[in-house]
Image (spheres, rainbow, N blue to C red):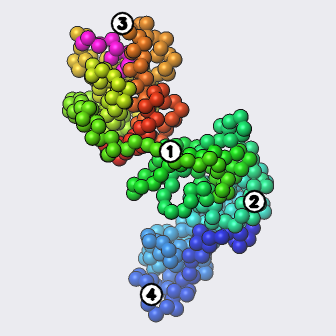
Amino acid sequence: MHKELVANKKILFSESLIPVAEIAQMPFRPKRFRFEESKEFLMSQGKNIEDFYYERFSPFSWFVYYRNFVVINIPAFNVQTLKDMNIAQAIDFETARLQSCLEKRHYESFFNLIDKRVALEAYLKLFPIIPDEEKYRLFWYNFSRLRLGLEDFKPEFINLIQKYKLPIKLPIDEQGYIEIFRGHKGTNSVSMSSSWTQDINTAIYYAHQIHAGGKVFRGKIHQEKVLASIKYRNEKEVICFPGEVKNIEEVKFINISELMPQLKKARVIDYYERYSALLRDIYFYKPCGIHGLSHTRRVLLLCLILAWMENLDKKDWDLLSLAAIYHDIGRTNDNFDPQHGRESFNKAESLKLITPELKEHEMLRFIIENHCISDHHAALSINEYRVNDPKHLLTLYKIFKDADGLDRIRINDLDVKQLRTSSAPKLLLIARELLEKIC
């Protein structure tokens, strides 16, 4: 496949290379550049000087070896560096493993191993021999891996790739449309964007990444207009030609700065500070881990915000706050662990953080013990707890689960469809902001 089908030549690695022989003719050479001695040494190692280049766009490694899809970084071009880094041996090793994949026709392994800078050019060159059933998938894998854009290619190139399109499973409605989102910045029309996502959290992330001011948009696209659904970065990316997304509208969210005056007035922040002060490093097996102090503080604040939004009494605020600060102290790992709720409650009792005399003891026990199992199984076990109002307890339980669930954004595993209360989806942006502020 010809490189002319690539619209943006800057994404081609070879375009950034200048042969070291040309650098040797320049009056001002880079520091530690010793062409003549290095050439002689490389020849003694069976290497051709024509395979060595100066990479003008690299900020870290100025020189590279490039041949047969093999790229080896070389920080300085002199004999000492070539020897210290065992460049000849590195070339031989990398060449052998890539050629082995090609000989066995293991193209997926080949593209997993290859330096991503040359993956696109390798794909273009190997296109004629890549099996038809792998052409589509391998292209979009490299597209995602290299973080390319549809505008980097000419339309005829993409149309050619689509001839090898594989079936895509998407959550479509009765008319065959899928709901998608985009985090958008700048002055360009969002309707002309080609990269969208099925995950609203991903859209929020890109809208507010680095600098605030981005917006989140919702739209829908017919399944037949989807060029690719990319899952490699766990961003549920959807690629389409510009203009194919319909019914685009901005999604409005509450942000923490706008909400803060109300939270202070309602004493939400007072409650947060009071209960946050009860936390101790020694309660957690990994205080700085993903289930440690920061996670606990975020869940605490989210619980209180949800309790305020759902108009709960202050006694419920106290109950949810206690559940929040102790819900993960029984963890001994960061894996899926449906037993850690019971372990957390037992530990809280053994440390006398929760005592049997507490009026809400059974309600607290239910929330902590069952927060890590399914809602269905939790509801089935509620009769095992001595509570006067099971219905209200389940309401508190759902609020707590939503607060804990909202902080799953820290592991990129927040499913909005799993949220239970009407208030929780309004806090998606705040959950992202708290991840940055309480850490």
**What's the amino acid at mark 3?**
Asn
Q: Which residue is mark 3?
A: 388
What type of secondary structure mainly makes up the magenta span? helix
Where residue 211 appears, as percent x and y from the top left, is: 39, 57
Disc 1 secondary structure class: strand
Inspect the magenta stretch and tell me whether residue 360 lies in it.
yes
Mark 4, Cα crowd under 10 Å, few <14 / some 14-19 / many 20+, is few
Front-most of residues 48 and 267: 267
Q: Which residue is mark 1?
A: 251
Q: Which residue is mark 2?
A: 159
Q: Which residue is mark 4?
A: 29
Compare marks 4 and 1 and give the one earlier in the sequence. 4
Q: Which residue corresponds to the image point at 77% horizontal and 53% vertical from the top-left?
A: 164
**Eye-nearest disc, 4 or 1:** 1
Compare marks 2 and 4 and give the one earlier in the sequence. 4
Question: For the image shown, how many numbered marks are present on the structure?
Answer: 4
Q: Decide if residue 117 is on the left or right side of residue 224.
A: left
Q: Quadrant of the C terminus?
A: top left
Where residue 178 appears, as percent x and y from the top left, is: 65, 41
Query: Which segment is the magenta one?
Result: 358-369
- Residue 344 seen: no
Where residue 370 appears, as percent x and y from the top left, is: 42, 19
Circle 2/circle 1 CB separation < 8 Å: no
Mark 2, Cα crowd under 10 Å, few <14 / some 14-19 / many 20+, is few
Rounded to the nearest whole Å, what is the CA distance between mark 1 and mark 3? 40 Å
